[in-house]
Amino acid sequence: MVKSMARLLRVGAAQVGPIYKEETREEIVERLIALLEEAAHRRVELVCYPECALSTFFPRELLDWAEVDKYFDKSMPNPSVKPLFDRARELGIGFHLGYAELDGDKHYNTSILVDKEGEIIGKYRKIHIPGTVEPRLDRKFHHLERRYFLEGDTGFKVWPAFGGYIGMAICNDRRWPETWRVLGMQGVEMVIVGWNTPQLRLSDFHNRLSLQAGCYQNGTWAVGIAHCGEEESGYILMGQSMIVSPFGEVVAMSYTLHDELIDFTIDLDAGKRIKEGLFNFEKYRRPESYKVITERKGVRLPT
Ligand code: CDT
């Protein structure tokens, strides 16, 4: 009997350390390209950059719109990001990139998937937007994503790409089981999720908990990528970029809060055992018992 070939994909999580406000776009893109060169050296086929990888994490500050808009990209690839697209195409590497997107007058927190030929083949706009609209005056740092970003209108999608089925989510999305299940129901084999998460008491634990549970319960790999470290203001974002297997194991994890590449050769077929066994959705899901999940938004106590 001929054993079929494993579907192997070498992926990299290109963690990005602090981006200071005075860094130019050119300098930021140079940093991303340096990570790409390292990835090429390690024969990585798909490099994943984090959420809002092209700027400082501006939602921590109260800014006027003219100032905010300079962090948003109106088209992709635009001239400032083209060197990254060009170098990736030359190296024959695909990538995932998170950035702040301005579409007309609409502001989104967006990620794209780019194939080895430099074509954008997938776009996702963040659905679960955290934080506040108004600044919390009792806090030194704010989290004003709800002020600056609209809720995404793309839905959670899965793309046939890189020899498998790839899904995208962004930061806060990873905490919601619905994100993972909606991707799982589309047969996702690898979820790419970048984040900017304040370093608080249980941040690392909640991050691992969300990724490991999401992967295991849906038989998928995840590549989680941090934009992290201490910014000039003293604001600290958590690291722990990681690659998680469909069994929920962390197989690679970053150990710094700086620009750092981690990589792993994943077997896209690894989730099959779970998907055909314990979590065989077709056989064992009981949607008739899950109606409250889509029929109501909030909790209603039984009377
Ligand atoms: N970027 C992002 O979504 N960050 C949130 C922080 C929530 S604290 C208001 C996260 O879920 O990690």
Image: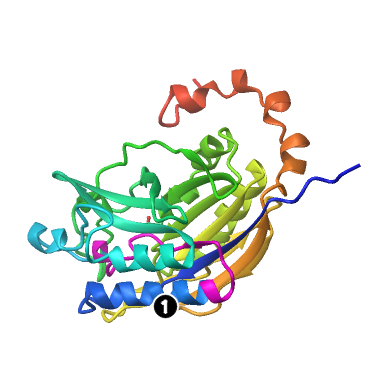
Whether the magenta-drawn stretch holds residue 129 is answered as no
Question: Residue at horizontal 28%, vertical 60%?
Answer: 143
Question: Residue at horizontal 33%, vertical 51%?
Answer: 110
Instruction: Look at the numbered disc 1 and give the secondary structure of its residue.
Output: helix
Q: Is residue 274 above or below residue 171?
A: above
Q: Which residue is mark 1?
A: 34
**Ligand 1 shown in quarter:** bottom left
Magenta segment main secondary structure: loop
Q: Position of residue 84 (x, y in %)?
A: 35, 67
Whether the magenta-drawn stretch holds residue 48 is answered as yes
Between residue 90 and residue 31, name the one nearer to us. 90
Rendering colour mode: rainbow
Question: Residue at horizontal 71%, vertical 36%?
Answer: 279
Q: Position of residue 294 (x, y in %)?
A: 47, 25
Residue stretch in magenta? 40-59
Instruction: Evaluate whether residue 19 shows in this view.
Output: no
